[in-house]
Amino acid sequence: MKKILLFMLAVAVFHSCKLGNQNDTKPVTDMLAAHLDTSVSAAEDFFEYANGGWIKQNPIPASESGWGIGNLVQEEIYNRLKKINEDAVTAKAADGSVSQKIGDFWQSAMDTVALNNAGITPLKNDLDKINAIQNTTDLLNEAAALKMEGVNCFFGDYVAQDDKNSEMMAYKLDQGGLGMPNRDYYFKTDARTEQIRMAYKQYLLKTFKQLGNDDAAAQKNATAVYALETKLATASRKLEDLRDPYKNYNKMNVADLSKLAANINWNDFTKNIGIVKLDSVIVGQPEFYTALNHEIVSTNIADWKNYLQFHLISSFSGYLDSVSFNNIFIYSQTLSGAKEPRARWKRVLDAEEGAMGEALGQLFVKEYFNETAKKRYIDMVEAIRDAYKDRINKLSWMSDSTKQKALAKLAKITQKVGYPDKWKDFSALKIDKGPYVLNIQRSRVWWHNYNFNKLGKPVDRTEWDMTPQTYNAYYNPSNNEIVLPAGIFAVPGYKDADLDDALVYGYAAASTIGHEITHGFDDQGRQYDPEGNLTNWWSIKDSTEFSNRAKGIINQFGEFNPVDTFHINGNATQGENIADLGGMLLGLDAFKKTEAFKKNEKIGGLTQLQRYFLGYALGWMYEERKERLASQVMTDVHAPAKERVNGPVVNIPEFYEAFGIKPGDKMYRPDSLRVSIW
Ligand SMILES: [Zn+2]
């Protein structure tokens, strides 16, 4: 995946001059030139040089954890979607139509008076069922019901392609059940993590008071739930230990699963979540299930009931009254650094996106997606594929037999651009005027059923896992495909045709298309074959060569220290960093074949090569708060924006040429330490 937050693609208040139309009598209005901070040398800090001018003029809004080019694109998308929603409210659409659903969803969510009057009573049915739990059987039955409503509890489970047989869908069981983002939050001893833990414990306490407990009981419950989660965290793998697809692949039949975790009646549990027939499961982290199995009987039922109550409220806190929202917001501030909540209507659009994003996307592309732009990017994918082919052929470290297999995989990568050919059918999803939280609940059940119905059926390779209006992109190893939603090509205030090639090759060809294609050949993607199966197609020698080269990038990123004492996790982020470096090299190869590069005319006082690197940096024009930086380093497999720019460029000879970087400069990296993989 390209990025967790937003970003990518450009923006602009300023118009970039078209190539060949540079007119010296006009004032400089070039976007790239306007964003520079010329008080910083490119040789000292390329990111600050490229983006510092814009960042200084655009402080992070109080409601945000960071702010950058992606937010501006997202703002544009929000405004378009808001209009679609408001129009739907007044449309008087037929009952059951997409427009009726969108209009009613919006109305149910925006009526804060009704929401505050209701408090948590819309969840009374679920709370009563939890209160009625008497024994382990009841507990697991209720856990199954809550899981169908998307409540995070006990463990993670989902339906996805079988890694070793991409034609089949499999039921997968992972570690999970924590309230904080991952296991490290329960154990790290630095001051920032201590503070996050304190805030989380306060959140637990407030929730138990909200549920009607007196102070002493609330404190007792909070302590017990925290202790229980700490045990689950102890048994959970670290972020970097989740990267090996073989270690995450432990296929077994239900009888063996029942031996691994005998205190869960798996036949009952899987039937309760809607699975009709189940031959096998793929367990990601068996040791987690051993620990969970122990806790199911050694933790008393009262504590488990409190655990479920808390996770129920927490899971729906954004769709209830202001008390529920404020309680979780105060805790989440320690992770995001946001000074105030985001506007309600934006949070509602995020929720609607999760509930029925494709329904919204259908209306979105009808109004806003441009076929000319689509063609430009489809062609660009092929240019990047050609560049990759040349690179593989020229690799000095790879044997011919592995090269042939790599080329076969490259040729088979499919591309999806813009929006799906076939839309998801939301007709079975009931959306009405409220309560809001029940709309969310029904949509989660709809999604659960939608996904679990895939079990035992052929894989639908036309499906999209992102909506068209998403500002992001992904590579799916099981389908060997790259998926580039229309949203990633949205350029507010800008016509796509007005963007010069150097800029577009930097930010679209390199940082999106080249990046996603390289994921097919990063530390994880390379382990899947052209058909999307986890199979080893590498010779031992070539595989060792790759790993040694990847070590270079692991070490390089491990040197970065973006906040406090937190260093980037070089191991956990290696796949993304390999993709960034590969994408930048492929984009550059493809760009060198364009007329624009060959003519080499300056735009905005910048050479074509400079514009290419600045175009890449533009995709990461983003500043973030310390809290958000710390969260990112602990939980995200993507390095922060600044390092995603300054990290890869120092490995590329043309970067030195473009900006005259010399030994002794901060951006200078000795030849012996430069990383070269693809
Ligand atoms: Zn990625």
Image: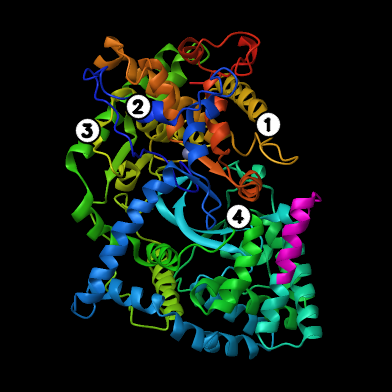
Comes first in the chain, label 1 or label 4? 4
Q: Report if the CB atoms under discs 1 and 3 are less than 8 Å apart.
A: no
Residue 503 got which mark? 2
Kind of residue sitting beneath label 4: Ser
On screen, residue 584 versus residue 212, left or right, reads left
Q: Quadrant of residue 587?
A: top left
Q: Report if the CB atoms under discs 4 and 2 are less than 8 Å apart.
A: no
Q: Residue 563 in the image: state x and y as whole percent.
A: 69, 40
Q: Report if the CB atoms under discs 1 and 4 are less than 8 Å apart.
A: no
| Callout 2: SS | helix
The residue singled out by tag 3 in the image is 497
Magenta highlight range = 186-202
Kind of residue sitting beneath label 3: Ala
| Callout 1: SS | helix
Residue 336 got which mark? 4
Report the predominant secondary structure element of the magenta stretch. helix
The residue singled out by tag 1 in the image is 558
Q: Does residue 536 show up?
A: no
Say which residue appears at 24% left-offset and 15% top-offset: 595
What's the CA distance linking mark 3 and mark 4?
36 Å
Residue 187 colored in magenta in the image: yes
Kind of residue sitting beneath label 2: Leu
